[in-house]
């Protein structure tokens, strides 16, 4: 079993942050964040897209309970998931962009693969 990263936050704040980041990723197609956050977002986003590919009632309810915007959930089932029908995983790509100016944290761009 893989160990989850704690990201320096209590579990409720960490869960809320990851939900928000996954929602923004599905809404915009790409986001810039730190490398460790991007790696955690990738895990969650891949699970959500896989649920979107299933498309049955149970997976829809799971997605609606995780994604924070209803319009993004609908877009996931209508546009995003059908585009990955032939693909078995690997829906996201992480590109390192170098250190952040303020605190030199390693930054990365996480985007959905076309």
Image (cartoon, rainbow, N blue to C red):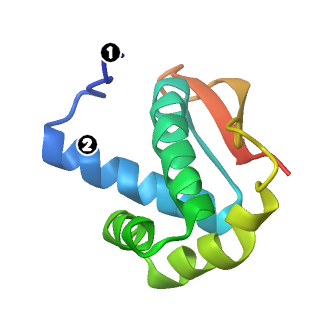
Q: Name the spot of residue 55 as percent of width and height, x first.
A: 55, 69
Q: Which residue is mark 1?
A: 1
Disc number placed over residue 37 in the picture, else none: none
Dot 2 surroundings within 10 Å: few (below 14), some, or many (20 or more)? some
User: Which is nearer the eye, 33 or 43?
Assistant: 43
- The correct choice, above or below, for 47 with respect to 70 in the image is above
Q: Residue at x 13, y 37 (%)?
A: 10
Q: Secondary structure at mark 2?
A: helix
- Helix, strand or loop status at disc 1: loop
Q: Identify the image quadrant of residue 65.
A: bottom left
Task: Depth check: give the residue in front, 46 or 69.
Answer: 46
Residue sitting at 75 percent across and 66 percent down?
A: 82
- Between the residue at mark 2 and the residue at mark 1, the CA separation in whole angstroms equals 19 Å
In the rendered image, residue 111, in percent from the top left (x then y), is placed at 72, 46
- Residue shown at the point (53%, 48%) measured from the top left: 45
Is 48 drawn above or below residue 80 in the view shown? above
Toward the front, the furthest residue is 56
Which quarter of the rendering shows the N terminus?
top left
Earlier sequence position, callout 2 versus callout 1: 1
Q: Nearer the viewer, residue 77 or 111?
A: 77
Q: CB under 8 Å between callouts 2 and 1?
A: no
Q: Which mark is residue 14?
A: 2
């Amino acid at each position: 079993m893989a160990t989850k990263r704690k990201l320096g936050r209590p579990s409720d704040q960490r869960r809320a942050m990851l939900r928000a980041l996954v929602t923004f990723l599905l809404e915009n197609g790409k986001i810039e964040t730190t490398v460790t956050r991007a790696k955690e977002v990738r895990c969650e986003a891949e699970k959500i897209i896989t649920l979107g590919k299933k498309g049955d009632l149970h997976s829809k309810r799971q997605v609606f309970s995780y994604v924070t915007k209803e319009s993004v959930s609908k877009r996931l089932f209508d546009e995003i998931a059908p585009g990955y029908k032939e693909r078995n995983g690997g829906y996201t790509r992480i590109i390192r962009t170098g250190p952040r100016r303020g605190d030199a944290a390693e930054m990365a761009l996480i985007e959905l693969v076309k």
